[in-house]
Amino acid sequence: MLEQIAGLTLAVAAFPLFLWVPGAALGYAVNLLGFRTRPIPVRLALGLLFSLCCCPILTYFLVRFWGFPAAFGFYFLVWIAALGLAIRNLRRFVRAAAELFTRHRGVLAVCGVWILVGAISEIDFLMPAGVMRSLNTGDAAAHVAFTNALSRTGIPPVNPFIFPGHPVPLFYYYFWYMMCSLVDQLGGSLVDARAAVQAGAIFSGLAVFAAITAYVEFFGPLVAQGRRLRTGVAIALVTITGLDLLPWIFEDFMFRVFHRGDGAGLSIEWWNEQVTAWLGAVVMSPHHPVGMAICFSSLLLAVAAAWRTEGRQRIWVIAVSALGFASAAGVSLYVTFAFGAGLGIWICVALFRGWRKYVWPIAIAGVIGGLLYLPFATELRSASHFGKSPVALTIRAFTPVDYWLPSILRFLKQRPDVILLLRLVFLPLNYFLELGFFFVCAVFYWRWRRAERRPLAPEEMLLACLATGSIVICTFLRSTFRWNDLGWRGFLVAQFVLLLWAVPVAMDLLEKRGTAALPRRRLLLWTCALIGFAGTAGELGSMRINFEGPHGPDTLGWRAAYQWVDRNTPPDAVVLVNGDVALDLFSSLYGHRQVVAVGRAYATFFAVGDWSEKVLSDTAEFYRHDQRPSDVVDFCRRYGITTVVVLSEDPIWADRNSWVWRLQPAMATRTARVFRVDDLAQMRNRI
């Protein structure tokens, strides 16, 4: 536990070197968006957002062509420049630091509380009952493997989940985990890929807070209709989710009492096609909220170029905006796709209304960003073996329509056309349950806005088009890579806009008397808010106490075995694990090495080709039956394997006369045995 906490603490401390210092130095040096005159919390936010826009795409090109040493050389120069700026403006720097600790302690408190919550949500609890992981480790196993693969193999990274005797390129948008890899490498033996990814999830939450802070600063008066807008209220809204708790309880009740359905899932999001809670999304899939923050940061810069800047400043904001659009696509392609759809709608509206002067800076930034992203897109294309279209037409699924109605009206099971029609009819109810408080707030906000009887400003239309584009994409398209990540993650764009629209309603709700706009609806708003807060608390709690995959005392030995592999094998080692499992989480979370086949879920998920099935079949057969030591060595040589891990759950473990027990392991626990192939070859020669 202490080792985990120490590694995570160092990783959290290292992240600002890559994702705050560069942006803050740039912002101060060129006074980007009036950086020097902004309040301290806004400067902290802008430093993070500018870094998020610039650093991923710049790091990609540096590592892609010259390797990680070039990237570290670049950041070293940035740190020297930042230190020079700090020394040159020492008085201002000290004054700003003093102001932060005296007048803005709330900012430090919010960040501190989130770091603590994030740390508790991420680390393992080691108990006699076994390794108590978080529910997010299924996703985190992939993220840790990406990060470690980048650290070991550079760019383009090797697919860590499958190794048919030769390296296979990874097919994934990995820019966020490239930044985690920098932290992993900088931390040396004190910070591993797991700690870097955990710290990245914490910084993902800070990125969402920073985006909210920036939009409150620049768009606040517009969204709040002239009311005083408090950043604290806006950030507090991330603790509210939809009404998922109600159908989740209903499904649990139906299963326990009437034995209908699958019951309540381990996550409250699993009852339906997800519109994920903010904090749940950050913990489960941190790169998608980061992608959302980068998209909106890039847009903020492009808007500044169109509305508020001129001359050299305009060149700077367009350049950083273009870098941001390219970075966003490499961090989360799904979020950027949904964001781009909304931006495309706004450009059409703006051209129709004659707002051409507002369009061209955004268009220029978008085109340059697309060109910068093109080399990475080409790389992904060459790594892909996915035969079908990555997206398909649909109407967003709704569990009451897809399961409960057909279970009552059985003829619907043979009428998929009627199911699609019912999905469309029930879309408002679907989104009311998924959005809850934010759905109601959006209705009230637009009632207020229509009551003013004045035309929409370009910025207002921009936010409305972004939300519309996101909702349309995530309602009528779905991704075909096993899960509907497009529908789940692309909706973050609409969620961000809905959060901004909810702020004035929330401010009015907190007033003692309220206004005439909320006479008898306060109860509805408070009810939705409290259920949404309970849903977020329940989601974080459920993710902490529940987990998928192996459990029990045996897992302590498995964890120790893979940690031994991490510490006692070279970085280029190839490890054999049993591929006949859904997913071997332990090899990715603790082993940090290339595996031959990590399991059915990920070995075939990342578009690696049909031959992955043969690799899975071969490795599964290897663990089913006893073999001669010479056959074991020959199999390992065929796949380039250097290390073999056998766990107590593997079929061959139960055969006490098998080679697993006849041969001497390099390391053994009560529930795991690790063999070096070179040692097995020597034993074979002696036998």
Image (cartoon, rainbow, N blue to C red):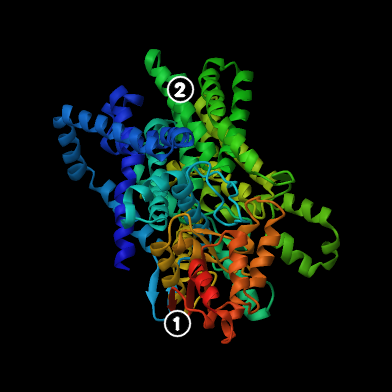
Say if 82 sits above or below 569 in the image: above
**To which quarter of the image does residue 669 belong?**
bottom left
Q: In the image, residue 580 lies at what x, y percent? A: 64, 69
At 43% across and 38% down in the image, what residue appears? 67
Say if 486 sits above or below 567 in the image: above
Quarter occupied by the C terminus: bottom right
* Closer to viewer: mark 1 or mark 2: 1
What residue is disc 1 on? Answer: 670
Say which element carries label 1.
loop
User: In terms of depth relative to the viewer, which is nearer, 254 or 358?
Assistant: 358
What residue is disc 2 on? Answer: 318
User: In terms of depth relative to the viewer, which is nearer, 60 or 495?
Assistant: 60
Q: Amino acid at mark 1?
A: Arg
Res. 441 visible in picture:
yes
- Sequence-earlier tag: 1 or 2: 2
Left or right: 427 with respect to 575? right
At 49% across and 66% down in the image, what residue appears? 678
